[in-house]
Image (spheres, helix red, strand yellow):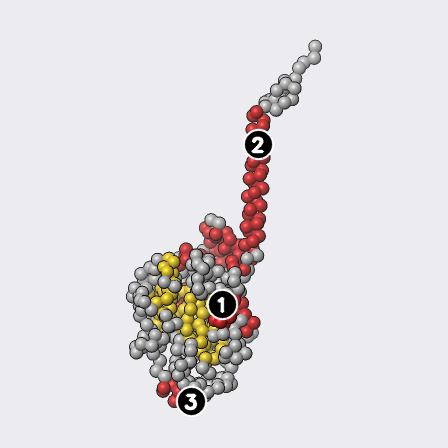
Amino acid sequence: MTERRPAPPNRRRGGRPTKATFRRRRIRVALLALTLGVVGWLGISLGSALTNPMLGSSLPGRFAEWARGHGASAIVNWAENLWYSHHPPPVGGKPPDGAIKKVHRHEVHTTSGPPHLAPPAAIVPPASPPLPGEGQWTPVGRLVGGLPAIYVTTLRPDPIHTSYVVGVAWMDTKLLRATLYSGSQIPGGGPYPDTAPISPTASDTLVAAFNAGFLMSAANGGYYTDGQTEIPLRNGAASFVVYRNGSATVGAWGQDVTMTPQVVSVRQNLDLLVEGGAAVPGLNANDTTQWGATLGNAVYVWRSGLGVTADGALVYVGGPGLNITDLANLLVRAGAVRAMELDINTDWVNYSYFTPSSSFGTASGANGTELLSAMAGGPSRYFQSWWARDFITVSAAPVVTGTPSSGSLGRPLQHSASARARVSPTPLTGRSQRSPPRG
């Protein structure tokens, strides 16, 4: 007698699947569809991010920004911290050829001209002996009323990491007017009257543009512009403040600067680095939890900062291999009495100045120059509609007094003694005081 084999489980006699089999099949199909959907979405989302210049100028930078925006900040910070801990800045060595900019001898003779600040004194470099041109200023960019409004220099950031070079820009705030440009990513929202791209009209007076601060989620501060508080301002926070007449300063909110009807923009970022002409107490080069958690607290990274001098000039410092104490010390050496950290990381530190063919020409990426050749992104970013981060510009102020003579740029720039005597270095707000405006 032939033995009968048992029927397969969950199948009726005759080979018909049971309800349980159908249910398992549906679950498997649903899981497969879900997996394919997630993988497809990740592919599209990540692919779009890797080709989106708004997220950075490099693929690693774009990937990191995408990951942070999708809940992986802790993983990104851990990876970046691991990278930097295994790639410390080299000790000793010489900068690459051409990294220290040679001083171009410039001389401008003025018998009359618009009010302007005295040119900055040379910076004493931290590394000794100084290299040729190190810490010596060169006037650059569009002339304003026949006078240079920006000076730049390069120098090594400390006596140990001597193969690195950072850039410093000094801005004559009597000749310049500042604008805070807002973005859909920083601070978010909008649209804003002043946002990328810089308009052709604004480009006709543009002298320089540079990065602002952190993503607001990491800035520990607020954002105010065009009569709207986008993010509540924090008392004590380091603040870049722009006034209705285009004057600007840096200070601690509620102490050095406060809200008045003349304030049009306030961009806060962390706490002051420099106060009273000295680095604030408690800065620790080995503890950056307060000064850049977005990079996994890496110590030596690309950093930038902005300060104000006793006579109201703005000074910008930016470059690679900077810890927080070096940044503060360089701002002090550049003359800052108060200063704040701006953005960090290779993709976000950028200062560009513009030299159109004439003083009344249109600034563009084509005639823009970066403070350091290694700065990422390029001058064109500020003229692109996709640029969604906030940034700061300085533009030529209207020349209302005096008739400037045509200046020649050929020897170290020196204003004539008679011209200096006519111009007292008062703050940008026009108040008769020696310190920068306090609200």
Report x, y in % for residue 124.
Answer: 42, 77
Which class describes the residues within 10 Å of circle 3: few (<14), some (14-19), or many (20+)?
A: some
Say which amino acid is labelled 2: Arg
Name the residue that disc number 1 marks.
198
The vertical placement of 118 against 293, above or below, is below
Q: Quadrant of the C terminus?
A: bottom left
User: Cα distance, mark 2 to mark 3?
Assistant: 88 Å
Q: Earlier in the sequence, mark 2 or mark 3?
A: 2
Taking the view exactly as shown, the residue that stands out farthest to the top is 1
Report x, y in % for residue 417.
Answer: 39, 88
Q: Quadrant of residue 331?
A: bottom left
Left or right, 350 with respect to 248, comes to right
Q: Secondary structure at mark 2?
A: helix
Q: Residue at x 50, y 86 (%)?
A: 408
Numbered circles on residues, count? 3
Q: Residue at x 32, y 62 (%)?
A: 236
Answer yes or no: is residue 178 visible.
yes
Which class describes the residues within 10 Å of circle 2: few (<14), some (14-19), or many (20+)?
A: few
Q: Secondary structure at mark 1?
A: loop
Name the residue that disc number 2 marks.
26
The vertical placement of 179 against 188, above or below, is below
Q: Secondary structure at mark 3?
A: loop
Say which amino acid is labelled 3: Thr
Q: Quadrant of residue 188?
A: bottom left
Name the residue that disc number 3 marks.
111
Say which amino acid is labelled 1: Ile
Q: Residue at x 61, y 20 (%)?
A: 12
User: Cα distance, mark 1 to mark 3?
Assistant: 34 Å
